[in-house]
Image (cartoon, rainbow, N blue to C red):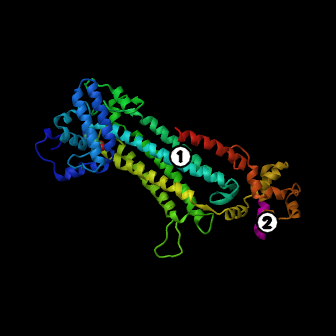
Amino acid sequence: MKLWSGRFTGKSDQLTEDFNASIAVDSRMYRQDIRGSMAHARMLAKQGIISIEEKDLIIRGLEEILDEIEAGKLEFTVEAEDVHMNVETFLTQKIGDVGKKLHTARSRNDQVALDVRLYLRDEMKEIRVLILTMQQVLLDLAREHLDTIMPGYTHLQKAQPLNLAHHLMAYFEMLRRDFDRLDDCQKRMDYMPLGSGALAGTGFNLDRDYVKEELGFSHLTRNSLDAVSDRDFALEFCSFASIIMMHLSRFSEELILWTSEEFSFMEMDDAFSTGSSIMPQKKNPDLAELVRGKTGRVYGDLITLLTIMKSLPLAYNKDMQEDKEALFDAVDTVKKCLLVFAPMLQTARFNKVKMAAAARGGFTNATDLADYLAGKGLPFRDAHAVVGKAVLYCIERGKSLEELTLDEYRGFSPLIDADIFSCLDVKACVERRKVPGGPAPEKVEQALEESAQWLRRMQND
Ligand code: ARG
């Protein structure tokens, strides 16, 4: 029998039951649902709303239910609709009528607002660790590649030489912001909603602060109507998830390019590559491609949630039950992608020779030639024009800037001396860029040191 069937005379159509039920999706919150119910029951007893004996019976019942669910001994039913009513049904089956007292001064509306928060808090802890693990991989790799020269690109055209360490640390920075965003989202989620009831609170004398402390929240929600209607925290999580996926998709795209024969900057380990069913020679970067593709799912999850919440009148509406599928998908996808990305990256081999050779082509040192002239007093705009001419001259003759003779250079500008050749060396070009945040190895080393300290702080947090 339905827990809400009192007002009904007719039976639910099976179609209604199936359509209305969310247990297939929300059953994964059973631990959080039970944790929340235990805190609620303790508070009810503390306030004299139920007796100590009743509370003990309820707590013991819930503990057993938790064990039995984990052991696979209890089966959720569609008839009981969602995780909240499934657990309550198990409880009443187990301890009898006392189980029916658990829902005193509570609604599924504040209950689900609590459960999703507790669930997301648990998942966010795991995601934090996954982000830090990936950052550790980046940091370790960067340490190895301080002198691995590579071309930097804009418009996917060779721009200026860099080292791989600096390039990898760019992703470290992105993940650091993602990590901050997650923390920030956690801050606004850290409000305990129980006591809000269906929408209008309750006349029972609850101790909300007690429940807050029991469940490890920092604050109480301040408005019962808002508390049961708010899914901002889920939206913020999906925004975080979308942004980190966007970062991973950019990295994936680069890895896909870099593993192509045309670039040949790196090779994935066999353990993190796949073959083709028809072309025997193939080694494909499928994992990176999948991460890139899954970014689309997570954007979809964010848009799903935003669209579900759009224009909903206060307070709870059943539309909101649809939030979980999108939210859980975002959680699962981000976790899976981070989990596979870290070892995929860690085991990849970089081809230093190819990278350095690529850095030497494409006139990546042209800016340095212009800077050289500007350093000798030529206005930068004029220097830019002179170098443009020199580059054109080289292109016509199939030469690089380093291959011009001093006489040829003198033809472009009398300011050029023999020291131009050491100036044009791509390694020197990188080493010269000593501005804070620049790619000079000594600056990257400083960045590595600062990043390592930050990482250690977060890992110990
Ligand atoms: N399964 C529901 C959800 O996830 C729980 C809240 C239902 N409340 C209600 N009044 N129907 O949204």
Whether residue 161 is visible to the viewer of this picture, yes or no, is yes
- Quarter of the picture holding the N terminus: top left
Q: Residues within 10 Å of mark 1 (few under 14, many from 20)?
A: many
Residue pointed to by mark 2: 393
Q: Position of residue 64 (x, y in %)?
A: 26, 41
Q: Comparing marks 2 and 1, which lies closer to the viewer?
A: 1
- Residue 414 image-quadrant placement: bottom right
Magenta stretch bounds: 388-398
Most common SS among magenta residues: helix
**Amino acid type of the residue that numbered disc 2 sits on in the rendered structure:** Tyr
Q: Please tell me which residue is depicted at 78% across the width and 50% down the height of the picture.
A: 380
Q: Is residue 264 part of the magenta span, yes or no?
A: no
Q: Please tell me which residue is depicted at 61% across the width and 54% down the height of the picture.
A: 141
What number of labels is visible? 2
Q: Residues within 10 Å of mark 2 (few under 14, many from 20)?
A: some
Q: Position of residue 393 (x, y in %)?
A: 79, 66
- Ligand 1 visible in quadrant: top left
Gap between marks 2 and 1 measured at Cα: 49 Å
Q: Please tell me which residue is depicted at 53% across the width and 39% down the height of the picture.
A: 460
283 relative position to 90: left or right: right
Q: Is residue 9 above or below residue 391?
A: above
Q: Which mark is residue 132?
A: 1
**Amino acid type of the residue that numbered disc 1 sits on in the rendered structure:** Leu
Q: Which mark is residue 257?
A: none
Q: Upstream in the sequence, badge 2 or badge 1?
A: 1
